[in-house]
Image: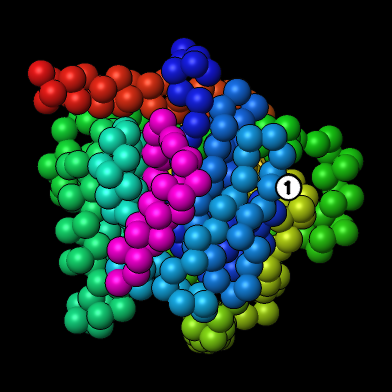
Amino acid sequence: MTTLSKLPRILMLSLHGYVAAEPELGLPDTGGQVVFVLELAKQFRDLGYSVDIVTRRFEGQPEVDDMGHNLRVWRVPFGGSEFLRKEDMHDHLGEFVARFTGAIRDSSLTYDLISSHYWDAGYAGQQIAEEAGIAHVHTPHSLGSWKRNGMAGDPQKIESDYRFEERIRKEFLTFRRCDLVIATTNQQLEVLGADYDVPDSHIAMIPPGIDEGRYTPIMGAESNSLRRRLGFRRHDVYTVGRAAANKGYDLLIRALPELRELVPDARLQLAVGANSRADERRIAKWQGLATELGVEEHIRWLGYVEDGDMAAYYRAAPVFALPSRYEPFGMTAAEAMACGTPCVVTVHGGLEEMFDFGSHALFADPKRPREYAVMLSMPLRYPQLRERLSIVGARFARINFGWRGIARRTLQAFEKARSQHDRMLIEVVG
């Protein structure tokens, strides 16, 4: 285990979205990655490290959010004063690097290691690491090649909207130059090797964590009370997330007619937050699909669920669905599982590789509506299976995804990367 004397100060870079001490999850580009970075940073702080989370400053945000002893969110302005999509960060990373390196020079601030998150922060973080002469560990969260392969539509429009070629080239350079890459799933590890030529020896596989004190099961009577209060019925299926195309809400809607053949009173509860006109257009399109399929009256559109209410909704749900076309991890499924809610997850991500089918969770291909509907119906129809998934799944989630254990594993990976970096410098000087 690393010690305070070996690695006292960590710089965590997460540049896009609305990163804050108390983020409003569901805002554009603000979801699981922000939770990941904040929770990991809190654990590092509690384990004795000093941590700066550095992000972009825009829309009049304060420069600093002080999160208590040795932890802060520090915002550096670049790319103008308005929100920027993560796909549009390419043209502004040079400005960020110049502003940030200038700021730490002026304040004589030094770091012992950089932990970057997503391709934009990784590309910038590598430049900062090389200038400072320190180790850099990168967590991609998602991969451009994988995401591009999972998208349908006109290739030219997709490239225009997402700039995948440029992103993939920058990802490749970051993976090659950084000291270690952290994959969050086994499937991600495989794609890093197959699409980016990253050797296994250069990758550590560490899943995201969950707040095991917050996401816990509750007794049946309390769960029934929650269901009445939140408007859930005994055969409802729940999902939550941003209004993003990769989340597969349309796939879940397509599965609903098949599900209702098996469970006639089944409904969907969709907590899909809309924070832009593009989001609203997507939701309108999905609602149109429900009308076309004749199931619009069997769907409740819940809108944005406040972060403080997340656990209550997970606990109230009879079944949780993760129907994504593409999902680097699926933190919402891990949270729901920890609350004792049976989960049916996508096979397009890697989360299912960690599960024992029928004990921890169920999984299926949401691109096959009948297949996914059958899996959704199983815990709704069979109480013994539902209880097994609830009990064994919650135990599995707590043991494998608790943040403290994930943080310790990550610090061990940091120390390995730092040691390798230092040995390389000695060899170069020698």
Residue 167 lies in quadrant: bottom left
Residue 416 lies in quadrant: top left
Q: Amino acid at mark 1?
A: Ala
Q: Where is 399 relative to 341, above or below? A: above
Residue 158 lies in quadrant: bottom left
Q: Nearer the viewer, residue 71 or 284?
A: 71
The quarter of the rendered structure image containing the C terminus is top left
- Is residue 92 in the magenta section? yes
- Is residue 189 in the magenta section? no
Way the structure is coloured: rainbow
Region of the chain picked out in magenta, as a range: 91-116
Rendered location of residue 256, percent (x, y) = 54, 67
Q: Where is 112 relative to 423, above or below? A: below
Residue visible at 55% across and 58% down in the picture: 75
Q: Which residue is mark 1?
A: 311
Q: Is residue 416 left or right of residue 262?
A: left
Rendered location of residue 253, percent (x, y) = 52, 70
Q: Where is 332 relative to 232, above or below? A: above
Rendered location of residue 78, percent (x, y) = 44, 69
Q: Nearer the viewer, residue 371 or 89?
A: 89
- Element type at mark 1: helix
Residue visible at 17% across and 42% down in the picture: 176
Q: Count the marks.
A: 1
Q: Is residue 428 left or right of residue 51?
A: left
Residue visible at 27% across and 44% down in the picture: 131
Any part of residue 272 in sight: no
Q: Nearer the viewer, residue 344 or 148?
A: 148
Q: Nearer the viewer, residue 244 or 23?
A: 23
Q: Is residue 297 left or right of residue 152?
A: right
Residue visible at 42% across and 20% down in the picture: 412
Any part of residue 421 in sight: yes
| Magenta segment main secondary structure | helix
